[in-house]
Amino acid sequence: MKGYKVASIGHLELVEMPSEVGEAQVKVKVNKAGLSREDVSQLSKKQSSQYIISRQCVGMVVEAGSNVHTVERGNRVLISPYIPCNHCVECKEGNFALCFDLKVAGKNIDGYLRDFVVTEASNLYLLPENVSDNQAVFVEHTARALAIMSKLNIQKGNHVVIVGASIVGLILAQLAIYYQAIPILVDGRQSHLDMANKLGIYYTINYVSVDPYKKIEAITGGRLSENLVLLGSGNFSLFNSTRFLMSGGCVVVADVEIYKDNDSSAVQAIAEKQLSLYGINNGLKYFMPAINLLANKTILVAQFVSKEIKFDQVEQNMQYMSSNPYEHVKVIVSSN
C-alpha cells in the first residue's frame, strides 16, 4: 500500500503504508480521490506533522475483517473524511458532528491519496449504482452545504447571499433553488460565476467590477437579504458581509480554514442588526441525504471537474496546482 505524504513545503513523497486489516476494519481499493485548494494549502504549510493529502475517496471493498457485517467484498463505497474520537461527551451522546476532537482526513490525520485504504467499517457509505464515482467525490461538499442550509432561516421566496463561489458555494446555491429560495452568489472569479450561470443560478455578482451592496439592494428591492453564508473563498470580512443583510437576518460562517477576519467591528454589527450567527465546519450528519441528492440529479457537479489524472501523475500535477491554485476547481485522481 502506497500514499502521497507531504514531505516538505511544496513536495510530496510516495510512502509505504501498513496493510493489516483489523477485525472491525476493511481494505478499500481507491477508484477516485479528489484534490482541491485545501490540498494545495496543506502542501504549502509548514507543519510539525505531515499527512497524506485528499479528503474525498471512492473505492471498492477488497477485504473485510471478521467482525464486519455492514459491507462485503465487492461493495462500492465512499469513505468519510471525518473521524470522531468516540470518547468525548458529544460522541457518547451520538452527536458525532460536534465531537471535541474531530479528525479530518488530509488535514490532521492521513488522507486518501493512496492506492488502498484501511479504515473502520463505520466510516463507509454504500453507493447506489446511479451515483458515479466522479459524482461521489462531491458527496462531502454536498453534505457540508446541507449542514449550512440547516442553519439558515429559509422560507419560500427568501434571498440567500452566498459569499464565495467555491464548490460548496455552488452546491449551496443549487440547494437554495431546490428549497424555492433565491440565491445571490458573490465572488471575484468570473470563471466560477460563469459555472453558476450554467447551473441556472441567475443572480451572480463579480465584486471586482460591481458594488455588491448596491446590486444586492437592487435585487431585493431595498430590503436586503434574509440570509448570508460566508465562505472563506469569497475574500470578504464578516463585518463587510453583514451589510448585505436585513435586521434580524441569519449568518452562517463556514470553510474556516481559509477564512481570516480580525475586524472586531463585526461584533457590533451583529448586535446592532440583531443577527443570528452560526458556524459550520463539517457535514457529518448529512452524507446519506447528500448521496440521495446526487442520485436524483438535484445537485449537478460534472462541470466542477477541471481535470482527471492517474495516480502516478500526482507529483507533477501538484507542483502545477501549487503554482496556479485558482486555475483548478477539482482534480480527480484515478487508479492506474
Image (cartoon, helix red, strand yellow):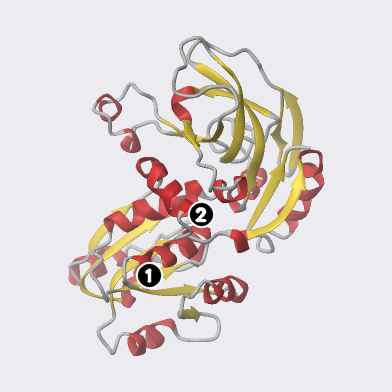
| Residue lying at 40% horizontally and 60% vertically, measured from the top left | 262
Q: Relative to 224, is 86 above or below?
A: above
Residue at the spot of label 2: 258
Q: Residue 247: x percent and y percent?
A: 20, 74
Where residue 106 sits, quadrant-wise, is: top right
Give the residue type at disc 2. Answer: Ile
Q: Nearer the viewer, residue 189 or 67?
A: 67
User: N-terminal of the two: label 1 or label 2?
Assistant: 1
What residue is at 31 percent from the left and 71 percent from the top?
180
Q: Residue at x 41, y 33 (%)?
A: 102
Q: Is residue 185 left or right of residue 51?
A: left
- On screen, residue 182 versus residue 236, left or right, reads left
Q: What amino acid is at disc 1?
A: Ile
Q: Tell me where residue 279 appears, x and y as whole percent.
A: 33, 52
- For the question of whether residue 255 can be seen, the reply is no
Disc number lying in front (1 or 2): 1
The residue tagged 1 is: 177
314 relative to 98 in the view: left or right: right
Q: Position of residue 14 (x, y in %)?
A: 76, 30
